[in-house]
Image: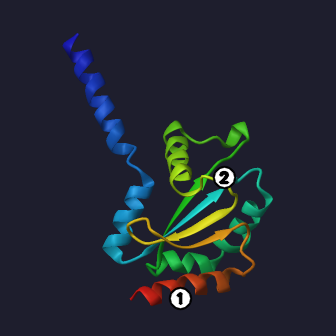
Amino acid sequence: MKTIFLTLIMGLFSMGAVAQNRFENAKKEAAAKKELILLNFSGSDWCIPCIKLHKNIIETEDFKKLEKENVIVYVNADFPRNKKNQLSAEMKKENAALADMYNSKGQFPYTLLLDETGKVLKSWVGLPSENALAFSKEIREVQQQRK
């Protein structure tokens, strides 16, 4: 009985360590590397502007350079509707908490540029009108202003 109890307790503690919050990790990484955080709220399987944002901006090489060059840490808070695309319970909980903090109106897509403490520096509601290069340039300008 003691063995079962100890196994359960150890399992619960290890799940808590593994399920550490992506956003908290992003804040730590941003602070350590002097990066910004780009938080994107999307509905990856139902929101047409969200799908376009990912295809035309986030999945491009211009955008990916921002991550490679330590300009941003990217966090996607996704809210899929299709059963086959559902997220884990931990991810759903984290995304809901992020929405409570930053997207109480439930806008999609909604993209925020944050500092390492989570303070909003800039936001985009809907699909940005810029292409990937212009969007990336805008983020770089905010970073330069902070130096």
Q: Residues within 10 Å of mark 2 (few under 14, many from 20)?
A: few
Q: Is residue 20 visible?
A: yes
What is the C-alpha distance between the residues marked 2 and 1? 28 Å
Seen as rendered, the residue at the extreme right is: 48
Q: Is residue 59 visible?
A: no
Work out whether residue 95 or residue 107 is closer to the camera in this orientation and state it: 107
* 107 to 87, vertically: above or below: below
Q: Which is more foreground, mark 2 or mark 1? A: 2
Q: Residue at x 22, y 22 (%)?
A: 6
Work out whether residue 121 or residue 5 is closer to the camera in this orientation and state it: 121
**Residue picked out by circle 2:** 106
Q: Callout 1, which amino acid?
A: Glu
**Residue picked out by circle 1:** 141
On the rendered image, what quadrant is the C terminus found in? bottom left
Seen as rendered, the residue at the extreme top is: 1
Residue 45 location, x and y as percent? Answer: 74, 50
Q: Callout 2, which amino acid?
A: Gly
Total marks shown come to 2
Residue 17 location, x and y as percent? Answer: 32, 43
Residue 68 location, x and y as percent? Answer: 48, 77
Seen as rendered, the residue at the extreme front is: 105
